[in-house]
Amino acid sequence: MKLTNVQTTDVSFYEYRKQLRKQGFRKLGSGLYAEVYGKKKCDYVIKIGQLENNWLDDGYVAFLRHLDTSNPMFPKIKSVERFNWVKKSSVHSRYYVVKMERLIEYEAVNWDISEKAFERMGVDTFLDFEESAEYAPSFKSKFAARAHKILHKLWAKYHSDLHDGNVMWRKKKDGKYQLVITDPATRKYAY
């Protein structure tokens, strides 16, 4: 996915978050570097994340750059904006805003369905997701095989962040569930 140019802004990450709340968005979840906001009856969510260093060190931004938008195992991204918050002519922080489809939490789907999906992907469900990332499982569908290539390309440079909070479900029109990997990588390895 091609990312837009970085924009300079006088709105900080925290001010942006306040603006979302004023628009009726509520926090649905958070991780170490990012938070996800949504509104009731809204078909998309907004993920905002703050970077520790530069744009090339962030695993989620790298994931967005490598994202195969035709693969249903990845989220449907509506837009990505990147900001450098400038104060007194110097960059104080960097953050991104991603508008993406609203998905179903991993734990909200029957465990049997989850177990079958991971079994088809070759991932042992008794393992923690981060542990399973080390193993290079064999995938049985063409979409899973393509996702596998992208994930392992990312994990060669970035730490895996594959856990149950970063795996969700999309309910398809036929009522079946599609596994969606939303955020598989974090910081760059320090070599």
Image (spheres, rainbow, N blue to C red):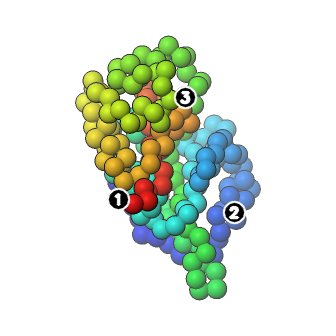
Q: Mark 3–mark 1 contact, CB under 8 Å? A: no
Residue 174 appearing in the image: no
Quarter holding residue 38: top right
Q: Mark 2–mark 1 contact, CB under 8 Å? A: no
Q: Mark 3–mark 2 contact, CB under 8 Å? A: no
Q: Residues within 10 Å of mark 2 (few under 14, many from 20)?
A: few
Q: Position of residue 141 (x, y in %)?
A: 27, 26
Q: Is 17 rendered above or below residue 54?
A: above
Three-letter residue code for mark 3: Tyr
Q: Residues within 10 Å of mark 1 (few under 14, many from 20)?
A: few
Which of label 3 and label 1 is nearer to you?
3
**Residue depicted at 57% across the width and 78% down the height:** 91
Q: Position of residue 49 (x, y in %)?
A: 57, 56
Q: Secondary structure at mark 2?
A: helix
128 or 172, which lies in front? 128
Disc 3 from disc 2: Cα separation: 28 Å
Q: Which residue is mark 2?
A: 14
Q: Earlier in the sequence, mark 2 or mark 1?
A: 1
Q: Secondary structure at mark 3?
A: helix
Q: Residues within 10 Å of mark 3 (few under 14, many from 20)?
A: some
Q: Which residue is mark 1?
A: 2
Q: Position of residue 174 (x, y in %)?
A: 42, 19
Three-letter residue code for mark 1: Lys
85 or 41, which lies in front? 85
Disc 2 from disc 1: Cα separation: 26 Å
**Residue 133, which numbered label?**
none
Three-letter residue code for mark 2: Tyr
- Extreme left residue here? 142
- Extreme bottom residue here? 89
Q: Position of residue 166 (x, y in %)?
A: 52, 38
Q: Which residue is mark 3?
A: 106
